[in-house]
Image: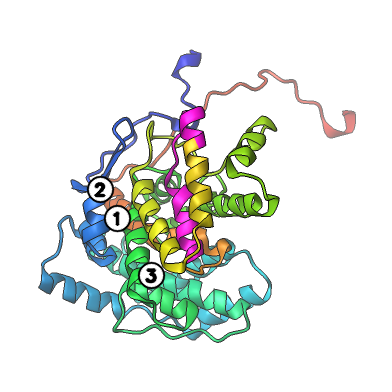
Amino acid sequence: MADDLKKGLEGVLVAESSLSHIDGDEGTLIYRGYAIEDLAREASYEEVLYLLWYGELPTHDELDSFTERMVAERAVDEDVLATAEALATADAEPMAALRTVVSQLSVTDPDGETDPEDREATLAKSRRLTAKIPTIIAAFDRYRDDDEPVEPREDLSHAANFLYMLNGEEPDEIAEETFDAALVLHADHGLNASTFSAMVTASTLSDVHSAVTSAIGTLKGGLHGGANQNVMEMLKEVDDSDKDPVKWARDALDSGRRVAGFGHRVYEVKDPRAYILGEFSESLAEEAGEMKWYDYSVAIEEFMSEEKGIAPNVDFYSATTYYQMGIPIDLFTPIFALSRVGGWTAHVTEQYEDNRIMRPRARYVGDKNQEFVPIDER
């Protein structure tokens, strides 16, 4: 029966999870019961990591201990940096470089090939991956600009340390707060494509590094993690065209193009994360005294929402938020991975605890009963 086919597994339940929940009709997102609005505005990324991995928000002492262990894992080995430098020299695409280096980290991990169902070892690997990915991304970016990497600092938050390693300057309070909130907002989002990819890999009882490498490869696609980069490139095209942004959007749709940053597989209304990032984008614009990127975004959002009935997703305002912080456009997707690794590893850990190998089926629609003809007779 054709009606039992679910292309893209849409609406198919494959797992139970206590990590995050999306209500697409109401436009809400929660992590372990906590509203994303509260977490983004009140909790640090480190607190959210602890929540995802251990099931509850930490006390002061628990957070201090957790942060201390995270900080201790930020540095990466020289051979890993050498790989990042070689990839930068070869002009590798940033997500391809990240995928390669993350895979290499499995070789140097102290827990090596431990039993995937060893929860403590899995969480230790998750902690190292999450701590080291910012160092890798920042080093890669500096290498391709012919600069030396900036060593991580122990006195900065996860968010501030990345911006410091990227730019060589300690970020101001607004930049740190904004970037930290962005990391919180991107930390998890149900069984999105990259998370599901990680879970499929983990379901074979492969290791955490393999699962995260799979997730990075999935996030690399333009229909998933690459969307915020597409948004910023679109806004730059609007700026270069000297057109009113609404006219540009209308002309783009009339010519059959998509307007990047709109629509979502789950949300029927505006993505709750877009509300928060829109506020940060506006604040950064006001601080810089340059409102055009934010103004373009608002004008296009109003046009798409009022005339087309389509609401923006998280990528729409994360693009201008990152761009106004001076982050290179092609690092937007690696930064997505920098945050989402927390959610990926939480889901992988959950998968290991009640594992069953992922093995869906496909309906065969090809030929049958073909008569084989030897090669000399073809």
Label at residue 175: 3
Residue 53 in which image quadrant: bottom left
Do the CB atoms of the residues marked 1 and 2 lie less than 8 Å apart? yes
Residue under the point 67% across and 32% down: 256
Query: What's under tag 3, amino acid-wise?
Result: Ala
Whether residue 52 appears in this view of the structure is: no
Residue drawn 18% across the image and 46% down it: 33
Q: Nearer the viewer, mark 2 or mark 3?
A: 3
- Is 328 within the magenta? no
Looking at the magenta stretch, what is its main secondary structure?
A: helix
Residue occupied by mark 1: 346
Q: How is the image coloured?
A: rainbow
The first of marks 1 and 3 along the sequence is 3
Instruction: Report the magenta residues as a range.
Output: 303-324
Which quarter of the image is occupied by the C terminus? Answer: top right
- Say which amino acid is labelled 2: Leu
Residue annotated with mark 2: 19
